[in-house]
């Protein structure tokens, strides 16, 4: 049992993040460097020397660069398609299927939002779908609330699986003790195979709990923003929400189970969109009467800010780069870059000859950093960032983009990615110091001390809390990826202490990271900013606590149930 002083030192970096970001409302760009300094102080107390502190930080910086390469490519492609007009064509195609606001929420928020999350992640769906809904006539407050809620199932697998690829594989792969347990005692062929099982469990949690997610999004709209203030209008489209959930969930779960963490959200959303739109065009699932918001004059002032519904916004994908009309483009041509993207991503992961070339070409590697034995690498061509950039280059002639449009896409990408650079570099470096503190002294790390203490306090009931721990990490950092980095090793340690299945608890951690995004402060701020409603964060977070409570409670119960049924010895 750790002493009180050891416990306080071990938790101090996390306390610093909480106080600075939640208590003082510091942005992550300011809070994370301070947390890193606190972690250095904690490492000194722990007995880490300068070499180990520097080496752990360097590993963190390199790991963060892997994340940033993926994020950069994903955001670049998204803004390329916005500037070319493709995204406007895609979005308008879905909006034209039905004028009913409930149907539009299912198509644009749940399905299209999940697709954007699977392709780009990192808060992009709310920043894109929110302005689109406002342009269609939604109250900005309603647009933000439903846009934040609707793509929750996709967040765990956002940006082509980055939360699991980076958050789990790179972090655990750098810890020799855990790697030997996974590939030896647990019988997995590799860390990647082990993470694939975590992806399967995360998808299983999501598919079961998420059965009501499309309905919840619609119900939030009708209950809090409808003229009748009731969920009854949402019940009228319950068959549609269940059909859309099934159309998304079947390929989503199968992909997570058989292909791994990169494709569930991307392919699930593509298939779900095709099947659901097809059913609607065939005349199925349309409600008897169109549902609409109350007249504009009846809306409370806090529903609308600087941008009137029906107006274009600076962030709206319906406006061309020159401020004029979107160029004429067929729906199939607009979708072509994403279709090619999906094919290439599958090929680079599933076709071994190509994967072997990409993993061995243009690899930036640093081994035995500062004599500590630590090492990390960047597989420039194998990471999805390279595929995104390739599709960006392909799209320029395919869509006939002008040099100004290309320049604007790069400028917008830089503006979007820049704030994440400092935050990610120091967030991952902080976690690496906490993680490597045990290796440096050949003893227990800070995270192991924290996990042991949590196991002692909660015992066999801990699986119920696992999603909430993941949600806390995402709430603090605003990222499922950073949540997995912050608390993945912690959850692993608790599972070891109480004898619970590691992959189930880490699956619950990954789901919790998605849940926390609902109320992550800077995600909410960004979503409000693009619809002209900055300052209404408190109202949005209070409403988002409803789906958060539902999702966390049922995910926790499932974690207990799965652990009890599959590993009854735990109890």
Image (spheres, grey):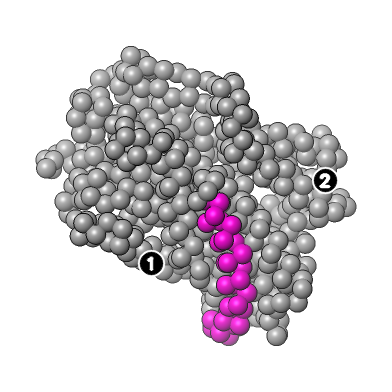
Q: In the rendered image, which quarter contains the C terminus?
A: bottom left
Q: Within the image, what quadrant is residue 275 found in? A: bottom right
Secondary structure state at the residue bearing disc 2: loop
Q: Within the image, what quadrant is residue 488 found in? A: top left
Measured in 3D between alpha carbons, the distance from the residue under mark 1 to the one under mark 2, in whole angstroms, is 48 Å
Residue 46 point in image, percent of width and height: 20, 29
**Residue underneath mark 2:** 322
Secondary structure state at the residue bearing disc 1: helix
277 vs 434, left or right, is right
Number of callouts in the render? 2
- Name the mark on residue 480: none
Nearer to us: label 1 or label 2? 1
Which comes before the other along the chain, label 1 or label 2?
2
Residue 514 visible in the snapshot: no
Name which residue lies at 59% across and 21% down: 361
Q: Which residues are magenta?
A: 228-256
Identity of the residue furthest to the right in this view: 328
Residue 91 point in image, percent of width and height: 73, 59
- Name the mark on residue 554: 1
Q: Which residue is more in the foreground, 148 or 534?
A: 148
The stretch drawn in magenta includes residue 312: no
Q: Which residue is more in the foreground, 448 or 125?
A: 448
Q: Within the image, what quadrant is residue 177 found in? A: top left
Name which residue lies at 36% across and 48% down: 503
Residue 434 visible in the snapshot: yes
Residue 365 point in image, percent of width and height: 48, 20
């Amino acid at each position: 049992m750790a002493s009180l002083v050891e416990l306080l030192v071990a938790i101090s970096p996390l306390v610093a993040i909480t106080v600075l970001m939640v208590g003082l409302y510091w942005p992550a760009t300011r809070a994370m460097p301070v947390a890193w300094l606190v972690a250095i102080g904690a490492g000194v107390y722990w007995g880490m020397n300068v070499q180990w502190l520097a080496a752990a930080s360097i590993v963190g910086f390199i790991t963060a660069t892997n994340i940033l390469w993926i994020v950069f490519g994903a955001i670049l492609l998204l803004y390329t398609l916005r500037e070319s007009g493709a995204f406007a064509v895609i979005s308008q195609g879905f909006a034209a299927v039905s004028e009913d606001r409930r149907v539009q929420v299912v198509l644009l928020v749940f399905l299209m939002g999940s697709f954007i999350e699977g392709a780009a992640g990192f808060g992009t769906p709310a920043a894109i779908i929110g302005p689109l809904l406002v342009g269609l006539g939604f109250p900005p407050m309603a647009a933000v609330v439903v846009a934040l809620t609707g793509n929750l199932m996709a967040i765990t697998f956002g940006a082509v699986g980055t939360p699991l690829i980076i958050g789990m594989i790179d972090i655990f792969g750098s810890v020799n003790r855990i790697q030997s347990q996974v590939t030896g005692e647990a019988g997995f062929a590799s860390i990647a195979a082990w993470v694939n099982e975590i992806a399967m469990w995360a998808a299983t949690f999501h598919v079961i709990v998420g059965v009501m997610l499309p309905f919840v999004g619609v119900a939030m709209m009708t209950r809090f923003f409808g003229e009748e203030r009731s969920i009854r209008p949402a019940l009228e489209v319950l068959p549609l929400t269940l059909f859309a959930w099934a159309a998304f969930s079947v390929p989503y779960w199968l992909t997570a189970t058989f292909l791994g963490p990169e494709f569930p959200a991307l392919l699930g959303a593509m298939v779900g969109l095709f099947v659901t739109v097809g059913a609607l065009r065939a005349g199925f699932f349309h409600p008897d009467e169109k549902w609409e918001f109350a007249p504009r004059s009846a809306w409370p002032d806090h529903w609308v800010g600087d941008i009137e519904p029906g107006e274009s916004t600076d962030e709206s994908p319906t406006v061309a780069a020159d401020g004029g009309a979107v160029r004429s483009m067929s729906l199939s041509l607009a979708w072509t870059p994403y279709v090619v993207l999906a094919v290439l991503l599958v090929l680079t992961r599933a076709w071994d000859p190509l994967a072997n070339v990409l993993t061995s070409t243009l690899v930036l590697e640093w081994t035995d950093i500062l004599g500590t034995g630590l090492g990390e690498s960047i597989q420039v061509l194998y990471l999805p960032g390279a595929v995104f950039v390739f599709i960006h280059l392909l799209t320029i002639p395919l869509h006939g983009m002008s040099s100004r449009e290309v320049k604007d896409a790069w400028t917008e990408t830089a503006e979007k990615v820049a704030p994440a650079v400092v935050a990610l570099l120091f967030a991952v470096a902080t976690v690496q110091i906490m993680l490597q503190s045990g290796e440096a002294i050949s003893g227990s790390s800070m995270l192991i001390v924290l996990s042991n203490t949590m196991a002692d306090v909660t015992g066999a009931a801990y699986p119920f809390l696992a999603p909430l721990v993941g949600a806390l990490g995402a709430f603090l950092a605003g990222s499922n990826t950073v949540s997995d980095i912050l608390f993945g090793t912690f959850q692993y340690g608790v599972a070891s202490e109480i004898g619970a299945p590691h992959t189930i608890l880490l699956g619950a951690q990954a789901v919790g990271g998605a849940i926390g995004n609902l109320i992550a402060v800077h995600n909410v701020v960004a979503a409000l900013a693009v619809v002209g409603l900055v300052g209404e964060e408190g109202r949005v977070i209070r409403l988002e606590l409803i789906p958060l409570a539902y999702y966390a409670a049922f995910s926790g119960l499932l974690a207990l149930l799965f652990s009890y049924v599959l590993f009854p010895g735990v109890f």
